[in-house]
């Protein structure tokens, strides 16, 4: 395949690019900054300059890439789906895989849900041979900002607070398993014009996740349940006082939602066979010193920090959002 990848310098994107190159595909990455360009070229990918905030520039970059397949990992929550779809159609790209999120199924009503839902509708109405991949919370590797921070916390603290008791279900997916299924989707005819929820092999409660992660770091941690209501009130007060709150009341509310998804269709069409959480978190705990760490781009300044997808590289406060 001749791939054009958006979001290639991110947590998931770097792994998709590396895996695609290892499989012998030609990879061109859409980049906006010199640091992203250096990172992608360091991995062995070609680059084209483009900015999804500027539709004309994006259209020119997509044409320059001369790709036959698009893998769009850039967040659908930023409102860029119409630009990406139009640029791909104009460039003559027929096949496209888009990364969305199972977060669109939340019972809450955050603004990002409406943006992502509209983005999926734009994709489905296009002439592209599209596939939408919706991962749950992504973890894995020492550059993971979800479980990596949880592991650090468990190493340091003998007590773990559990909002609402930690009885609600989660189903995290390992980043390497997700990267593999993204590439399989791009090469599988059965996946055309289909959407897939991508998750771990089975759901676990937050309490079980904490216990499994504690075993991975060799610590005995006491879980302490506490009511979520008072915590939400405190966090709302924090939000009102902070211009950039590290924790939001919505995130506490989402801890009280079950987030478990059947993966039978992905198993059937894409050969998806995710590793267990126990295996994934054990390997991650052992790799915390940086073994096999994909290169990362230099940190961006607050004014230019890209929006994350709620699953790909969110802070620990959103670990199960």
Image (cartoon, rainbow, N blue to C red):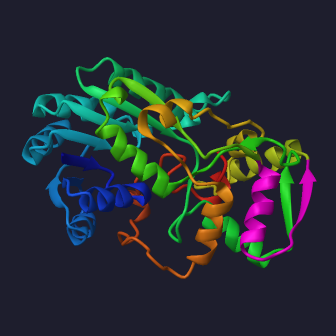
Estimate the x, y position of residue 187 in percent, counting from the top left: 28, 39
Estimate the x, y position of residue 227 in percent, counting from the top left: 91, 46
> What segment is highlighted magenta in the picture?
205-226
Q: Relative to 278, is 226 on the left or the right?
A: right
Estimate the x, y position of residue 95 in percent, counting from the top left: 23, 33
Magenta region includes residue 219 = yes
As drawn, 180 above or below 109: below
Q: Quadrant of residue 270?
A: top left
* Pick the front one: 300 or 131: 131
Task: Tell me which residue sits at (80%, 45%) in the image.
Answer: 232
Task: Tell me which residue sits at (67%, 37%) in the image.
Answer: 260
* Pick the front one: 229 or 43: 43
Q: Relative to 56, is 178 on the left or the right?
A: right
Q: Is residue 208 visible?
A: yes
Task: Tell me which residue sits at (16%, 58%) in the image.
Answer: 47
Q: Relative to 275, is 130 on the left or the right?
A: left
Q: Is residue 53 visible?
A: no
Task: Tell me which residue sits at (40%, 54%) in the image.
Answer: 306
């Amino acid at each position: 395949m001749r791939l054009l990848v958006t979001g290639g310098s991110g947590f998931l994107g770097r792994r998709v690019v590396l895996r695609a190159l290892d499989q012998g595909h030609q990879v061109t990455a859409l980049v906006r900054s010199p640091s992203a360009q250096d990172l992608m070229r360091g991995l062995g990918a070609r680059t084209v300059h483009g900015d999804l905030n500027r539709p004309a520039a994006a259209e020119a970059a997509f044409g320059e890439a001369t790709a036959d397949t698009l893998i769009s990992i850039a967040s659908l929550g930023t409102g860029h789906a119409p630009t990406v779809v139009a640029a791909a159609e104009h460039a003559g790209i027929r096949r496209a895989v888009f990364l969305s999120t199972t977060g669109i199924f939340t019972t809450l009503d955050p603004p990002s849900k409406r943006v992502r839902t509209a983005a999926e509708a734009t994709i489905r109405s296009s002439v592209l041979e599209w596939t939408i991949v919706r991962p749950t919370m992504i973890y894995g590797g020492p550059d993971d900002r979800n479980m990596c921070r949880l592991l650090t916390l468990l190493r340091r603290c003998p007590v773990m607070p559990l909002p609402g008791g930690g009885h609600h279900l989660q189903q995290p997916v390992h980043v390497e398993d997700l990267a593999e299924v993204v590439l399989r989707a791009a090469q599988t005819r059965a996946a055309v014009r289909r959407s897939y929820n991508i998750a771990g092999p089975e759901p676990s409660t937050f309490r079980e996740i904490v216990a499994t992660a504690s075993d991975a770091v060799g610590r005995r941690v006491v879980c302490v349940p506490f009511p979520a209501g008072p915590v939400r009130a405190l966090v709302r007060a924090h939000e009102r006082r902070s211009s950039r709150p590290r924790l939001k009341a919505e995130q506490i509310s989402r801890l009280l939602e079950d987030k478990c998804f059947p993966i039978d269709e992905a198993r059937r069409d894409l050969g998806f066979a995710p590793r267990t959480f126990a295996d994934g978190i054990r390997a991650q705990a052992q790799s915390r010193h940086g073994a096999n760490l994909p290169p990362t781009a230099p940190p961006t300044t607050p004014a230019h920090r890209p929006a994350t997808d709620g699953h790909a590289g969110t802070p620990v406060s959103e670990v199960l959002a």
